[in-house]
Amino acid sequence: MQVKRKMLVTGGGGYFGFKLGRALASQGLSVILLDLHKPTWDTPDGAAFYQCDIRDYSSLYKVCDGVECIFHTASYGMSGPEQLRKEQVESVNVGGTNNVIKVCKERGIPKLVYTSTINVVFAGKPIEDGDEDSVPCVSLDMHIDHYSRTKAIAEQMVLSANGCSAKGGVLLRTCVLRPGGIYGPDERRHLHRVNVERRLFSFSFGDPEARMNWVHVDNLVLAHTLAAEALTSKRHCVASGQAYFINDGESVNLFEWLTPLFENLGYSRPLMHLPVSLVYMAAILMEYLHVALRPIIEIPLLFTRNEVNRHYLFCFFFKLSCQTFSELWITSLSLFSFCSCWL
């Protein structure tokens, strides 16, 4: 009887991690979904859920026996109130990643694919048609938020670990994927952030020419599976030590992009346009109230200063470079489906 190859997905209880784990299981692989929180969906055949904190090394070590590849998607502090909890952001994104790298070495796991973010190269200035060669990571003191800074640190840790010796004479091969905003069926983080269902997002703001990238969850899953394959000797480890920007291949204005969603939910598109300065001051006030009143009451954050900066003030988008095409994508496979459904 042939033993199934075993994969582990950190953050496997989250939206993207679960989708990735389900896709891997559908390929006949044995999959471990690792997370602090149980997924809201039924665990697929071929997968098992383990409740574990990546900051707990002994627990992580126990569950990694026989694992061939780790897909490290777990993170903390991307949006909302989480952004303001700096100690937790640091401990998960940096400390947790350090544990993942360590367990790869001590368990002899040969492949590590890290889910980073486009934010590692953002320093509050416009980027148009950026790619891996033209847009380097910014220095750590230039990041505009703690999440981006800690993801940049973690990314460099993962890339620095590439080629390191692991137990059993194995060489650890690593690569990094930098997606834009993730969307798709059942996605709730971004839908909740715009508060469509409560009609609180009835105005627009920011530069109407500002554009950004999004990536459909199925496209991001495909990118991860291809990245893992590109770390094998069969593909000459071509992705080893590389970082790639991943998106649907187009840039869009956030409000224009959301228009079909508003209309299909029966809402009219935002007609009122507010000055950015007013929105920015409102974000400062909401952040202050959230922190000050947190011991007493949870004040919802519609958006933060960092989100205003990243999504509404600048063009901040990337192209799929020749490097990405040549190193990740296999000719016989369709690149992207350019899916556009949310619900």
Image (cartoon, helix red, strand yellow):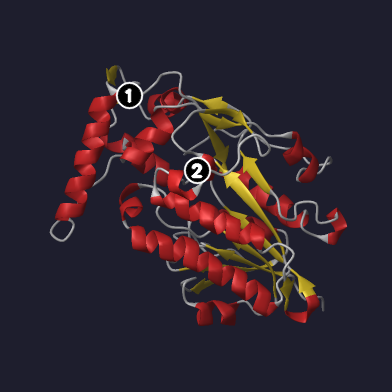
The three-letter amino acid code for the residue at tag 2 is Asn
Residue 85 vs residue 223, the one in the foreground: 85
**Image coords of residue 287 (percent x, y):** 23, 45
**Around disc 2, counting alpha carbons within 10 Å, would you say few (fewer than 14), some (14 to 19), or many (20 or more)?**
many
Query: Vertically, is 3 above or below 38?
Result: below
Q: Which residue was labeled with disc 2?
A: 119
Name which residue lies at 39% across and 28% down: 312
The reply to whether residue 18 is visible in this rendering is: no
The three-letter amino acid code for the residue at tag 1 is Phe
Name which residue lies at 70% across and 50% down: 242
Q: Which residue was labeled with disc 1?
A: 205
**Image coords of residue 154 (percent x, y):** 54, 58
Query: Vertically, is 267 above or below 337?
Result: above
Please, what secondary structure does the residue beneath circle 1 have?
strand
Which mark sits nearer the N-terminus, 1 or 2?
2
Query: Vertically, is 283 above or below 26?
Result: above
**Image coords of residue 119 (percent x, y):** 50, 43
